[in-house]
Image (spheres, rainbow, N blue to C red):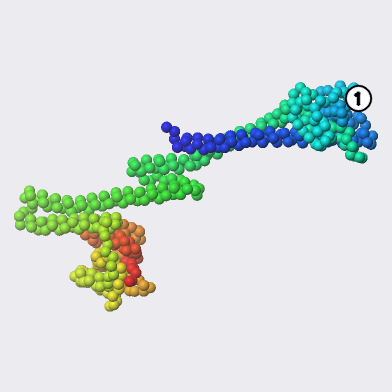
């Protein structure tokens, strides 16, 4: 089975070769016609030069017979043609070619040597410049390409005769062959260039695809670190960028999955160990009967804690996947905040916090899911109280402006470190990893808050100075 590279290379190369073949088929007749035109033009110019010299010879006597002979001889050699000077009776006055030159002019007496049976000289005399491809009615043993030019007087335009230059088809073919050789050489070079171009073009297209294939194979083995090199700015480059983004997202998702499993395992391990240990102690009699009720209360507390963790995990999963349906309707955000705060009265008094509540008396109506807003505000206020320093300050405020409702939850206390801020909304992330402050935290509260607000097309932000304060804030459009 051929690879994609081989198939692409062969197909593109075949297209190029077919194009070159079609070009060649159309080019060769053009080359032959071009060589025919060039031959005719060459013979015509030589014939006209001889005719002009003959006129000067007859009418001015300024041209010696030696000069006329030299012009005829040189024309025969330059054009590789038979030169015939014929009078009006079609009698040959001069016949020369490169091989018979000496013989013709050594017997030159201006007397007829031979007569041409063809009527071509008569046609030249009557019509002027003419050409034909024939043997001149048997004068030549084979067909020749002949050009005829009339010899006319410059004084009274009378006709002296004609000059005929003939070349065999072999000369024409030789010229055509030279042009064909040049054309074939050019086509050969073009073919080699096309093959090289096809090779590099195919590699340019296939290399990223091969890299993606290797990366996909690595992904199937769980290795999401592979990336595709980015070069250029074409569609393949865009595909490579999209692939790398997908790889980064997969790597992040895999990391999150592993962290989720690790965190869930860690969260389950401690209460399960506690429950198992106390139950075994009761069953094997290690724990005396008068203490069993105490330890059963601890088991119940840990069971409830496990139940809360499972519920929060399921809620976070449903929210992030969109399975948790939100009932969006106009609700009074200020009223929700007041009701939620009432549930924390004992917690605030227990830490002796100074609490400031700034909520407008008039309704602050927003389009939201009421239960979700209660969850958001509950988690924010709960965290603010848990991480506030004893006798510290808690402020919950709602203000309106620019068509939006702005909610802030502020507390003084341990704050959040700069290292933890980028991860504070990640699932199962705990800034207090040692649980020295909050042993009940699962690291899901802020993740749930962010997910709910994202479902409401807004976001939550945080500012903190470690050891001084922390403030969470978000906003919703008023209706």
Examine the rendered structure and indicate whether residue 253 appears above or below residue 471: above
Residue 310 seen anywhere in this rendered image of the structure:
yes
Q: Residues within 10 Å of mark 1 (few under 14, many from 20)?
A: few
Total residue callouts: 1
Taking depth in this image into account, of 113 and 327 the one nearest to the observer is 113
List x then y, in percent, for residue 416: 32, 62
Q: Which residue position is annotated with label 1? A: 111
Examine the rendered structure and indicate whether residue 173 appears above or below residue 284: above
Q: Quadrant of the C terminus?
A: bottom left
Residue under the point 91% across and 29% down: 66
Examine the rendered structure and indicate whether residue 27 appears above or below residue 224: above
Residue 316 position by quadrant: bottom left
Residue 329 position by quadrant: bottom left
Examine the rendered structure and indicate whether residue 313 appears above or below residue 363: above
389 sits to left or right of 151? left
Taking depth in this image into account, of 374 and 431 the one nearest to the observer is 374
31 sits to left or right of 227? right
List x then y, in percent, for residue 307: 18, 56
List x then y, in percent, for residue 319: 28, 58
304 sits to left or right of 147? left
């Amino acid at each position: 089975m051929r690879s994609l590279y081989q198939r692409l290379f062969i197909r593109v190369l075949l297209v190029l070769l077919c194009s070159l073949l079609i070009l060649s088929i159309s080019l060769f007749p053009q080359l032959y016609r071009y060589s025919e035109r060039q031959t005719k033009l060459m013979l015509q110019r030589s014939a006209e030069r001889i005719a002009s010299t003959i006129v000067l010879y007859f009418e001015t006597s300024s041209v010696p017979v030696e000069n006329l002979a030299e012009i005829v001889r040189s024309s025969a050699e330059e054009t590789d043609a038979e030169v015939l000077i014929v009078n009006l009776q079609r009698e040959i006055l001069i016949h020369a070619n490169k091989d018979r030159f000496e013989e013709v002019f050594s017997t030159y007496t201006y007397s007829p040597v031979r007569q041409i049976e063809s009527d071509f000289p008569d046609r030249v005399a009557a019509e002027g410049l003419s050409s034909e491809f024939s043997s001149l009615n048997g004068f030549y043993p084979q067909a020749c390409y002949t050009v005829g030019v009339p010899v006319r007087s410059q004084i009274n335009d009378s006709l002296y005769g004609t000059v005929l230059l003939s070349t065999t088809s072999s000369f024409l073919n030789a010229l055509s062959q030279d042009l064909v050789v040049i054309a074939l050489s050019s086509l050969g070079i073009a073919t080699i260039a096309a093959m090289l171009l096809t090779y590099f073009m195919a590699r340019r297209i296939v290399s990223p695809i091969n890299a993606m294939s290797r990366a996909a194979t690595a992904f199937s083995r769980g290795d999401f670190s592979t990336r595709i090199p980015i070069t250029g700015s074409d569609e393949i480059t865009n595909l490579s960028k999209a692939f790398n983004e997908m790889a980064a997202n997969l790597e992040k998702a895999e990391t999150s999955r592993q962290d989720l499993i690790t965190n869930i395992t860690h969260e389950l391990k401690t209460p399960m160990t506690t429950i198992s240990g106390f139950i075994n102690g009761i069953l094997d009699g290690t724990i005396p009967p008068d203490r069993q009720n105490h330890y059963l209360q601890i088991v119940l507390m840990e069971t409830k804690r496990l139940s809360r963790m499972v519920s929060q995990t399921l809620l976070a999963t449903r929210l992030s996947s969109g399975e948790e349906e939100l009932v969006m309707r106009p609700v009074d955000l200020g009223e929700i905040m007041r009701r939620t705060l009432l549930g924390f009265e004992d917690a605030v008094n227990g830490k002796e916090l100074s609490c400031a509540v700034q909520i407008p008396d008039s309704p602050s109506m927003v389009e939201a899911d009421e239960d979700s807003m209660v969850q958001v505000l509950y988690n924010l206020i709960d965290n603010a109280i848990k991480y506030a320093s004893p006798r510290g300050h808690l402020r919950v405020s709602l203000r309106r402006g620019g068509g939006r409702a702005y909610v802030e939850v502020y507390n003084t206390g341990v704050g959040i470190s700069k290292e933890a801020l980028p991860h504070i909304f990640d699932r199962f992330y705990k800034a207090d990893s040692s649980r020295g402050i909050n042993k009940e935290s699962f690291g899901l509260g802020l993740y749930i808050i962010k997910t709910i607000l994202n479902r409401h097309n807004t976001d939550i932000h945080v500012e903190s100075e470690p050891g001084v304060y922390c403030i969470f804030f978000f906003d919703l459009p008023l209706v």
